[in-house]
Structure formats: C-alpha cells, structure tokens
Amino acid sequence: MNNHSAMHPGVKLRHIRAFLDIAAEGGLSAVARAQGITQPALSRTLAELESLLGQPMFLRQGRRLLLTEAGAVFRRHAIAAIQSLEAGAAALRPGGSGTLRIGVLPSVATRFLPQVMLRFRELHPQILLAAETGPHFHLMRLLRDGHVDVMVGRLPGASEMAGLSFDHLYEDEVILVARADHPLREHPAPQALAVCPVILPPATALIRPAVNDYLAANGLAGMRPAFETVSLALGRGICLGSDALWFISRGVILHELERAEMTQLPTGARFLSGAVGMTRRQAVTAPGLSEFEDIAREVARNLGGAK
C-alpha cells in the first residue's frame, strides 16, 4: 500500500456513492429512502467522509445541502472515479454490458439521434440503447427519478436545472410550416396566421413561450389555436390535409422539408432559435454514457448545424 496516498484509507466506496447521491439531490431524506436506510445513518456516513477528507463537503441551508468549493472539486473527481470503476466492471461481463436509457424529445428524433445511436451501435454493440419518447415534463420526471440516464433535446428552463447538467450540442430553430402548395405560402407569416388554422406546441412544451412571444410581437397575442401538438405524424397529417400552419422545431419536420412535402414561411424572428443538447443528473453513471456523449458531440460537429 502507498503510505503517501493523499486520500485516507478509511474512505470507502459507500462513502463516495452516498456523497454523490446527496450532491445530486441536495438533501438527505430522498437519498436515505432510495438506499433503504435511515436519515441518521446516511448523515453519519457523510460525517465520516468529511472527517476522513478533513473538509466540509456541504453547506447546510435549512433542509438544503449545497456543495462547498472543496465538495465541488471532490465531486468532479469522484464522478470520474466511479465511471472508471463501472466501466471496468462492465468490461469483465461476458456478452452484454448493460443498458443505457435515453429520453428522446421530438426535435432530435428525426435525424440527429438516429445517427448517434447507429454510430454507438457500431462501436459498442454489447450495450443496449433503450429510448423513451414523450413530452418534456414526462422525460424530466423520468430523468429525476432515475428511469432514464440522459435526456436529449431542448435546454430545460433554469428553474428545472437543480442537480442537473446540460451539454450543449447545437442550435435548432422553431419554424412556421405548411403544405408545399399552401395558397398563402408567399404571403407574410403574420398575415397568413391571421386567417389560417394554426397548430401550436402544447402549453407545456419548451418552445411554446418563444412562439407566444412571436405572436404577441405581431399583434396576435391570445390567439386560440385550432390544434396543439409536437407530434410529427399528427402535425404533418393535419397540414397536408388542410390549410393549417404549424409552429414546430426544424429538427422534427426536416425530412418533409427536404422532400418538398412541406414548406417554411419565413418569420424573420431570430429569437425562435434555441439550444439542443444532453441533460443528465450530475452524479449519474450508466453503461456507455460517456461514450454516448462523445459520439453525440462528434455527430453534432460533423453535421455542422444541418440536423
């Protein structure tokens, strides 16, 4: 044993896992329930770690635990250490190496994420990629509850980011589309919106506030939409069968635009663009997660914004 090791030999894996879970949750009670132990027992584990490291890891503000500067530094290295251990254990398993669970928002499901998943499959065929689709609020709940390991899509709101990290990949526009032979396709967008049925994203969708701002800026505040959806199959079907106009992320409708089934009506609103990336719990470890993130970054760079 190296007698000059910087870390006390009394620090155990249970200390590190408890620390990372507490850092992710910002408190003790939820972690204690998840681990099936009492809160005092978890508190003793944390106190042991702080004593062994010789530094307080958290500042206590009411029921919330906030990382100290030392705690933030230790967490960064602890995450890397746990990921290395998990990868080493996975490499010893014959055959399969587990499952990586991905939450998928519509804006990335058409082109970007399929390329990432296919590339990942080529390099890591032993890891199953299990994709869960649904609206933003549903996937955020799955992410926080640990039912998905990473969510790929729009940047969540600031109020939703506690205990989470976001890795930016590219920018995606919200655009106004209609069927290719729409009679008002050459008209200014506000004029067409005033007389045609309109499909808006649901009120819970991340892109809805930006669309509302655009409508308000063009004297259409409080517009009652004919439909609300971000579903490609549903929105496409409505548009192709009517004069409806649809506000939707470009990434959702990309193939229909390229095949000239749908056309874009220029809005001239640059603020309708938004960040797309990967959101995950800060202390999460999962088979192949770091490799998946690296491939996603590579695909985003190679696409150069053409999703």
Image: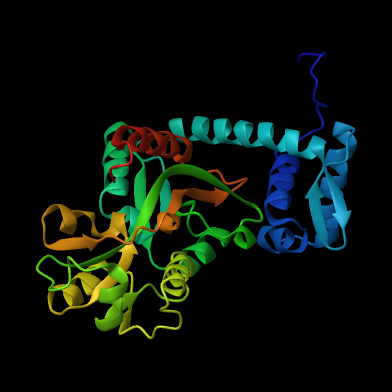
Image spot of residue 209 (x, y percent): 49, 69
Residue at 31% across / 32% down in the picture?
302
Image spot of residue 115 (x, y percent): 27, 42
Residue 202's place in the image compared with 82, above or below, is below
Q: Quadrant of residue 288?
A: top left
Res 152 seen here? no
Image spot of residue 138 (x, y percent): 47, 69
Image spot of residue 207 (x, y percent): 44, 64
Q: Quadrant of residue 134?
A: bottom left
- Name the colouring of the figure: rainbow
Whether residue 65 sits left or right of residue 279 in the image: it is right
Camera-nearest residue between 289 and 245:
245
Residue at 36% across / 54% down in the picture?
173
Tag count in the figure? 0
Residue at 56% across / 30% down in the picture?
84
Whether residue 256 sits left or right of residue 60 in the image: it is left
Whether residue 126 sits left or right of residue 6 in the image: it is left
| Image quadrant occupied by the N terminus | top right
Camera-nearest residue between 119 and 222:
222
Residue 213's place in the image compared with 103, above or below, is below
Res 181 seen here? yes
Residue at 57% across / 32% down in the picture?
85
Residue 3's place in the image compared with 194, above or below, is above
